[in-house]
Each structure stands twice: as C-alpha cells, then as structure tokens.
Image (cartoon, rainbow, N blue to C red):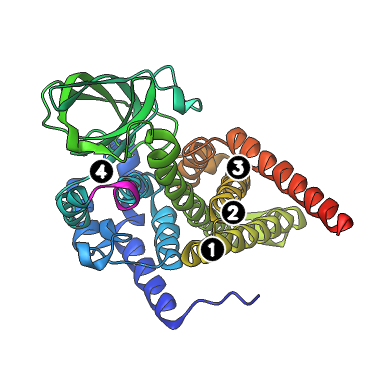
Amino acid sequence: MEIELTPQQVQEQDIFRAFVSEEIAPYADQYDQDECTPDEVIKKLAEIGYLGAIIPKEHGGQGMDAITFGLLCEEIGRGSASLLSLLTVHGMVCQAILKWGSASQKASWLPKLATGEAIGAFGLTEPNIGSDAKNVESTALYSNNSYVLTGEKKWISFGQLANLFLIIAQCDGKPSAFLVERNTPGFSTAPITGLLGFRSAMLAKVHLNKCQVPEENLVGKVGFGFSHVAGAALDHGRYCVGWGCLGLAQACLNACLSYTSERKQFGSFLKGHQLIQQMIAEMITNIKAARLLCYHAGYLKDKGDPSLIMETSIAKYFASRMVSKVADDAVQIHGANGCSSDYPVQRYLRDAKIMEIIEGSTQMQQIIIAKSGYHSFALEKRKARQKEKT
C-alpha cells in the first residue's frame, strides 16, 4: 500500500510548519517557565481556524480530514506539547458533541468551539480515579428537570481558562456525560502548578458543589458517559497525542542533528562518533515507524473502518514510548547542556514522559492491545473450525 500525501495535504503541512516555527516554537520555553499560555496565542489559534479543525464546515469549522488534522497535531507538538494538549482536549469536547450531542447541542456549541468563543476541557480524571475511569466518584442527581453535579476533577488540561467542560459523573450508578459551563453556580477551579511536564498547559482542579445544569446538557443518554461519550473523546485524544509525539520526537531529532554538527569532542564533531550515529539512526528509524502507524490510523479514520480504534491505540502506544526514548537520548547527546534551560531538550524530555500517561497510560494501552490480540486469535480459530466442518 502506497502512503503519499496529497498536494493539498503537503500545502497544509507547509502552512502548519511555518506557523509553528514563527509563532510557537521560539516562545515555548518561556511559556514553560511561566507555566502559562498567553491568551493571544490561543486567539491566534482560533483566528487561523485550528480550534475548529475537526468541526464540519456547516458548523463553522475547517472540516479537516484525519490525515491533515494529524499533520497539524504533529507540527503543534513539535513546537509545544503543552499547546498540543489544548488542541487535544478542546477537540475531545468537539468530538463528543459531534458523535453523541443532540441537534440543539451541536447548533449551540459547535460554532462557538470552532471560533474559540468557547474553549473546551474534558473532566474525567479525579483525585482517586485515574485509569479506572468508569468508576468516577462524582455524582449527578436528577431533580426538577435538571441534574445536580457534585464532585472533584483533577489534572484538567487548560481547566484554568476553559469555559465549557465535558464532565463525567455517576447518575444512578451509571457513568454519564454533561456539558457544564464555567459560570454555573457552584463551579470553581484551582490551578495546578509545579508539574514535571506540560507546564504551560494550565492544568486545574475542578470543584463541583451542587452545580445545577439543565437536563438538555446531558450528552447522549444516562449510562453512555464512559462507554460512548468518553470513548469517542478518548479515541480522538489518543489520535492527537500519537501525532503530537511525532512532532515532539522530530524536535528532539532536529536539536540533536544541529548540536552534533556544531559540538566537538576529542578533536572531531560529535556527528563523527559511531555511538552518536547509532543513537541518531535509532531516532530516525523509530520516528519513521511511528509516522507510518499514525498514517495508517488516519487512513482508517477517514474510511470509517471499525478497526481504527485499535489501530489508534497501537499508534499512540508506540509513538509515546518512542518519544520518551528519543527525548532521553537527546538529553544524553547534549550532556550537561541537555540539563540546562538554555537548551529545549530538557523540556522535551519532561513533556515526553507525560505523553506516556495522558489519554490512556502505556500500561492501559498494553492491556487493550493484548486483549484485542487474544480476541482476534479466538476469532481466527473459530473460523478455522467452521471451515474444517464445511
């Protein structure tokens, strides 16, 4: 199977790359130190249409195909993994509404999300609940044509500034999804700072103190919260992260190619040493392998192939492990300089580790992929038996 970008996709890729190189990459280290993404950066993303990348044109978005959107995630990830997380969680809210939202929810929120008038955040993780997401402790009680939400969410990317939250809570013991606006009485957020990575992703704790939301803010049906709504959102999130890992790994590789071409040890440039060449070769090979997995996931996504969910998990799993190794080697190649804030590879390493945790940890992806393998094996055995009988 030949994998080749269309002329339009190549053109879009060049535009994405130029935007990131001019508007994001030069300032990402400062944002990381400040632990903040300036409002004007988000406004630029909105003005150029990137916040509405996956939203259909009839709702005011760009209607990008999956590969083009992946290329955008790759370039944003190259410039700033923290900013990529905005594209990720904002897109997760968009995807959940697109897939499971009512006609009125789509009409009301998608145009606002497309223009940046509304910034979305995804409220699933809690202080006591991470990977066991279907057992969230937040509750939603139905009363007088509304739902009353109580609980706490944690590690919410861009929770400090988002104004529309997709919250997963238990309703009659069934995980359910709700759209909650920031100005809802009883709703508040608190910043989370001092993180290892994603320092400018403006993470927050979310407090829900008997927040009353109208019944039309329920997304899908009661009980659909994790298996359907969050599932659609997380699949989108894994897709974004997989492509973002590519961009972050490419940034590591570019930094190493530049550094080893300028730095001398033992009378010769670092690039002339065989052990350095080995590390560079492994970087290049693993990045290319991850890119093919991401292309394949995007191809299936555009086709609407049911296997896209598993292939997206595989792409995210491989790419996130890959970028952790690439970033670790990048710091090693830079030596003591790699531990200094004068060089971005220290930020790349910190951000790369987060990639293995968000939108389903490495271990959760391993469980999902292995179970799928056993399921496929059982199906093949069943088919073989049926064939023998006939």
Query: Is residue 343 something one can see in this rendering?
Result: no
Q: Nearer the viewer, residue 121 or 22?
A: 121
Name the residue type under label 3: Asp
- From what the image shows, is residue 24 above or below residue 139? below
Task: Name the residue carrying label 1.
Answer: 300
Q: Which residues are magenta?
A: 96-102
> Disc 3 versus disc 1: distance between alpha carbons?
31 Å
> Disc 1 versus disc 4: distance between alpha carbons?
26 Å
Element at label 3: helix
Task: Name the residue carrying label 3.
Answer: 328
Give whichever of discs 2 and 4 has the lower sequence position: 4
Give whichever of discs 2 and 3 has the lower sequence position: 2
For the point 18% across and 33% down, the residue is 215
Task: Name the residue carrying label 4.
Answer: 120
Give whichever of discs 3 and 1 has the lower sequence position: 1
Dividing the picture into quadrants, the one containing residue 221 is top left
Task: Name the residue carrying label 2.
Answer: 311
- Contact (CB < 8 A) between labels 1 and 4? no
Which marked residue is nearer to the observer: mark 2 or mark 4? 2
Q: Residues within 10 Å of mark 3 (few under 14, many from 20)?
A: many
Q: Is 99 a magenta residue? A: yes
